[in-house]
Amino acid sequence: MKIGIVGLGLIGGSLAIDWHPHHRIIGVSRSAETIRQALEAGIIEDGGASLALLSGCEVIFICTPIDHVLSAIEALAAVVPTGTVLSDVASVKGAIVPAAEALWPTFVGGHPMAGSAAQGLAAAQARLFVGRPYVFTPTAATPKAALEVVAGLVGQLGARIYYCAAAEHDRAVARISHLPVFVSAALLANLEASGDALAAELASSGFFDTSRVGGGNPQLGTAMAAWNREALLAELHRYREQLAFFEQQIALGEWQALEQSLQRCQQVRRQIFAPPPATGDSG
Amino acid sequence: MKIGIVGLGLIGGSLAIDWHPHHRIIGVSRSAETIRQALEAGIIEDGGASLALLSGCEVIFICTPIDHVLSAIEALAAVVPTGTVLSDVASVKGAIVPAAEALWPTFVGGHPMAGSAAQGLAAAQARLFVGRPYVFTPTAATPKAALEVVAGLVGQLGARIYYCAAAEHDRAVARISHLPVFVSAALLANLEASGDALAAELASSGFFDTSRVGGGNPQLGTAMAAWNREALLAELHRYREQLAFFEQQIALGEWQALEQSLQRCQQVRRQIFAPPPATGDSG
């Protein structure tokens, strides 16, 4: 199959690495250096800065930052033939899918839950998606054949494929990916506001882990909030109530009830991460 | 020097491992099996279940769970001669130090910021304290000679020694150790309350790290809250205000301000963890 990839970063580059032995990959990037490196690595057959290079592709994966997905679809609509399958990899779907479908009927919303803290083509790696979730959010308007094409390709990556509504996806990632960013960032903001130099000196592996995602890419954190705003605000509200519940147990000295609450938390985490955790991270 | 250690778990056992080549170590544990293993490993010279075994020790480290520190001091007071130096390793100091001093004048409050998720003598390891913070909280009543004895021994461990007031210590650990436990646990409680099976399936390394300390030992989390209640409640209050600030920025769509907030968080974390983080964790 002839596959186009727009954006050869961590995700786009990793897709190219896994697919290029079996397919013809054409890459598009605004960076000439990225194209040069992808050609040199042999993971794309051809590439450049122009979307017109993708006019002969049967399926095109848009692997740009969230903010550029819709403009990329709009630009592609002017240069690729009707029926070309387009799919994205953005970590939010509700704000993308209906708009994308209005621009291009053969669109399939997707989100691979894989990645790392690193960025760019240099961070791309083979077998990044093996055993990782890959979520599709088809609608009633999604052509069955288009969904089958992208699901077939993603199946070759060894990913675990899930199908759900965009809103269902967005609620789930708000809970386990976007909310933790702000919960974690608030720990850092609280420490900074305290001006407590001793606390900064004493911070150990517990604080290191719990503050990791909050100390991550500020642009990505902001994009998550901007594009998944409603679901994130709902989770922040529910989260605050949970925290207030613990706070009340502590204020009232209800130690037995608090220990039972923490026991449930321990069980929940053991259920979720029963097998060894994957090293990948959600974009 | 003849050193007594009450409680041969992760901390007490690791102290014995590092000190036994240079000192005579007497261990006390309620578990006969633990004493047998410590004798077999050669890290104690003698040991048993009775505190009377420690009557000839110049300094005794109490390495029990927080809840047993004061009762251990009370029991030791009946069997060791006046002037014996007692020190503890509990992760809270304000609720321990004044009461301990009232029971025994030659007492020095201490807290090694080292450990791991594992427990018991089997988790004890050599060089656990190297490069890690070890905080002492002497008061105006602490005999200088007693402080010098324990600081000298801790210096041999390779730890970084800090001196501060008990309240200052408790505020710092509330910020970087106790608060994160409940912030992290509330993420798990929020996920459980949602009943969202898809979210649990999609949880990746970001959720894994951020939920780690909240899914830890429920007894330890409860003890932290019970013994450092005032400082923890103050931090929970400040933390909620920080989180509400982010929530407001998101609700109002102040994306530039939000990105700046997240940039500061990123900088704060880089400042704290500039060198590679230690693998140890705070008890």
Image (cartoon, coloured by chain):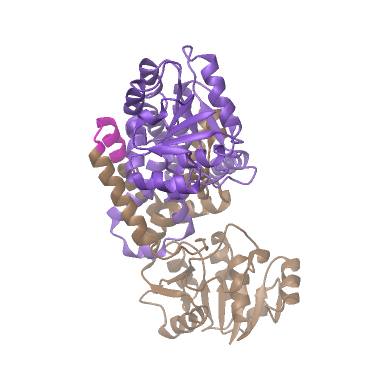
Chain colours: A purple, B brown
User: Horizontal and vertical percent for residue A72?
Assistant: 34, 28
User: Horizontal and vertical percent for residue A121?
Assistant: 43, 46
User: Horizontal and vertical percent for residue B278?
Assistant: 49, 64
Q: Is residue A92 magenta?
A: no
**A135 w.r.t. B243: above or below:** above
Q: Residue at x 54, y 38 (%)?
A: A20
Q: Residue at x 57, y 33 (%)?
A: B201
Quadrant of the snapshot with the N terminus of chain A: top right
Q: Is residue A163 visible?
A: no
User: In the image, is A103 to the left or to the right of A170?
Assistant: left
Q: Nearer the viewer, residue B58 or B81?
A: B58
Q: Main secondary structure of the magenta part?
A: helix
- Total labels drawn: 0
User: Horizontal and vertical percent for residue A98?
Assistant: 39, 18
Bounds of the magenta span?
B243-255
Q: Nearer the viewer, residue A259 or A217?
A: A217
**B87 w.r.t. B192: above or below:** below
Q: Residue at x 42, y 44 (%)?
A: A251
Q: Is residue B203 visible?
A: yes
Q: Nearer the viewer, residue B211 or A247?
A: B211
Quadrant of the snapshot with the C terminus of chain A: top left
User: In the image, is A78 to the left or to the right of A272?
Assistant: left
User: In the image, is A258 to the left or to the right of A238?
Assistant: right
**A254 w.r.t. B143: above or below:** above
